[in-house]
Image (cartoon, coloured by chain):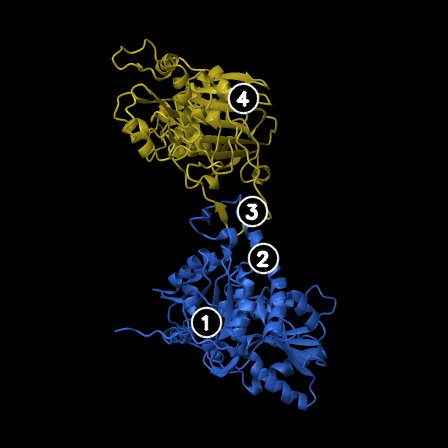
Amino acid sequence: MADEKSISVEVVYRGIFQKTLAQRICRSIVLASRKKGHTGTAFSRYGDSPERNGVPAKQFAIVAVDEIELEASMAKYEPAVVDISVAVDDTLVKGVESWAWYGRQPIWKPIREGGTLLVTSEKTPGEIVAQSDRTPKPYTLGIVPGGASFAGLWVYKDDHTDYRVLGALAKVAPRWLPLEAAKQAALDLAKGDRSAAASVQYGYDATVLRQVGAGEGTDGHEKLQFTKPGWTTMRPGIVVDARKPGQRNPQYKKYTARTQRPVVNFDTCIKCTMCWLDCPDECFEVTPEGHYEVVYEACIGCGICAQVCPVKDCIVMVDELKFADNRDRWQDWKKDRGAYNTWFEKVSGVPADPKAAAPASAAGGDD
Amino acid sequence: MVVDVKTRETSEVETEQLATGCEAIAEAIRLADVDVMAAYPIRPYDGVMQAAAKLIANGKMDVEYIVADGEHSQFEIVKHACAVGSRVFVGSSGVGWFYAFEAIAVTAGLRLPVVAICGNRALDDPGAFGTEHNDSLAVRDLGWLLPWAETAQEALDLALMAWRVGEDRRVSLPVAIGLDGAFLTHSQHIVKIPTQAAVQRFLPKFDLGDRLLHPDNPITIAPQVDQDWLMEIRRQNDHAMRQALGVIREAHADFKTIFGRGGDSPFLDEFMTEDAEVVVIGQGTLSLPMKVAIRRLRKEGHKVGLVRLKWFRPFPTEEVVRSLGRFKAIGVVDRDYSFGSPFYGGVLYNEIRSALYSQASRPAIVGFIAGLGGREIEQPMATEIFEKTEAAARTGLPAGDVCHWIGVRE
């Protein structure tokens, strides 16, 4: 890396679901580099606590040649710049909004110029870049094969995501994490289970690297940024405006918590109100016809609407990376039902007409 | 049975009453037309409870009088009542004050102008009821305005000042009036009771403006925040406390115009200081034994005087420095303790010392811990305090202790 005296790595993850996973990765980085005589620290971001389901959170590992260099790297508690960012869920590349007034930050924001973004994904590098914000600086994208691991939910069920990431890190930062040290650290963590070392080797071998040039990426995501007011412009007495009826929180939208989104078949909808009633984020709006359209800016993708909907396949949860924006889909249906239904079948993989046979292919991206 | 509620008696002229400090406070509650007061018995605050309850029972006062299940609820009740626009009163003493501590802390943070009395009383254990200022002083860093009364008359006057200053939108902070337990709360003196009309001229209606919690004004008060916000919130409180000094000066000037009382300075009450070389400074009822000693020592040729500090928060640094800089030596009498503090001095001692640090002319400062737990400061003790301070004026500060415990058995 550019700065040979220390390296900082952040792990971006889904709050609660992947907390243990992120912790194991950060600890492994420090423990593996320790085998080469380096020193380091691993920590989570205080502002993420208490973590909330799926809300993007971060943990960090900083490794340095000695204590003095480590202290220099730790002078800012949350690193403003990192050498490597690891996203352990590929839908996080659509942006990170961790709390109110945080805004939506591009996934590459803290990565230094020429740094590395590792993403655990079953997608191609091209698909990942297409969903990442347009970057002003070049970086290296590494795809670590595998889906989003929920290994850290409540109890740790090892699916070796941590070891594969460790192998990928050994590939992009061998000066700090030589492959053998990474394997040894994995063996220690796995209490001698040799398959852990094999997974490190697999991560090392199978990770696909691709250079992302300045200017690559999408402009489709919302620019959500805030300037925080000073004490002279804030209301006194810790008072904030309450939301007006029907108004949603403009400073905290939470849609970056989403890994899947509900897609609605308006033709089979019976207007029963269940989705509207049970949505914990009140993200359904009633259309003039009495349908319920999803306001994707407010939806966290929890899937409750799909669960409570009494009509089979009327609300279908679909991979978030198939969508490029948060625009209202009901307008599409209103404009051209046929085109909408074709699109619905393509993204959801279920027939728009329940009497018809399943569409040939559920695969393929949209937009 | 039909209860005959008497119409409220209002006087067109200022009257006099023989009243305790607690009764004087109850009269202030009546005159200020307080909406909600909360009560929980603890000596000496219970004196106010009884006096207020009597005024209500006699049909002289109309106030929502809520007896809480403890001091914490007591302070929460008025905090919430204040947020919806009520003028409120509350109070406690000693450990009761501490039991309410969480509510006390958030009230200042929320900038809600709750007016309280702290009937200063020793903290348990051991159980003791007499004066010590540590209960009030425990909140000194939190954003409460802290005046101390010398007499029952001043208790009433300071209460009216408290609503006026605390509720001023430039300040919007709670006020806790220090009343020395027993000496002030439970002894009766002649108190002038102003007319309702005069009080109304002095005290405008309470108006929280756009901070009023009301269905027509949808707001959220005190959402959870993180480090992104807290410093700005604290800085706002800091600013409000800075503003308070000017607002107190304004209110004091109006008070003097309307009621014809209050002394020259809103912050300091000076006694025989004009040609004094050595003065003693303290708070509350300390002045009584000190004034007696000063008159006696003056006859013997000692140039001694007294400065009584009326507001501890906001600390009137400018006034204190200007006044105390004139003297050769200062004796600070603390009716409190601050174990392990610099020079093992009391709270007031170290604050005054700190205020004078950057001054070109720095008088010698001697600290005295005296009268704890309501122990009387008798004349020999007062003499000893002046003697030690005069010695410091002659010889400079001694190398050893600069803080003395007065009237303590070895």
Q: Quadrant of residue B96?
A: bottom left
Q: Which chain is blue?
A: B
Alpha carbon of mark 2 to alpha carbon of mark 4: how far? Answer: 46 Å
- Image spot of residue A284 (x, y percent): 37, 30
Q: Label 4: few (<14), some or many (≥20) within 10 Å?
A: some
Cα distance in 3D space between marks 3 and 1:
36 Å
Q: Chain of mark 3?
A: A
Q: Amino acid at mark 1?
A: Arg
Judge depth for marks 3 and 4 and give the one in front: 3
Which dot, 3 or 2, sits closer to the camera?
A: 2
Residue linked to disc 2 = B170
Q: Are marks 3 and 2 in contact (CB under 8 Å)?
A: no
- Nearer the camera: disc 2 or disc 1: 1
Q: Colour of chain A?
A: yellow
What residue would you read off at disc 3?
A: A234
The residue shown at (38%, 30%) is A285
Can you identify the residue that label 1 sits on?
A: B30
Q: Is residue B225 above or below residue B350?
A: above
Q: Tag 3: residue type?
A: Met
The kind of residue on which mark 2 rests is Arg
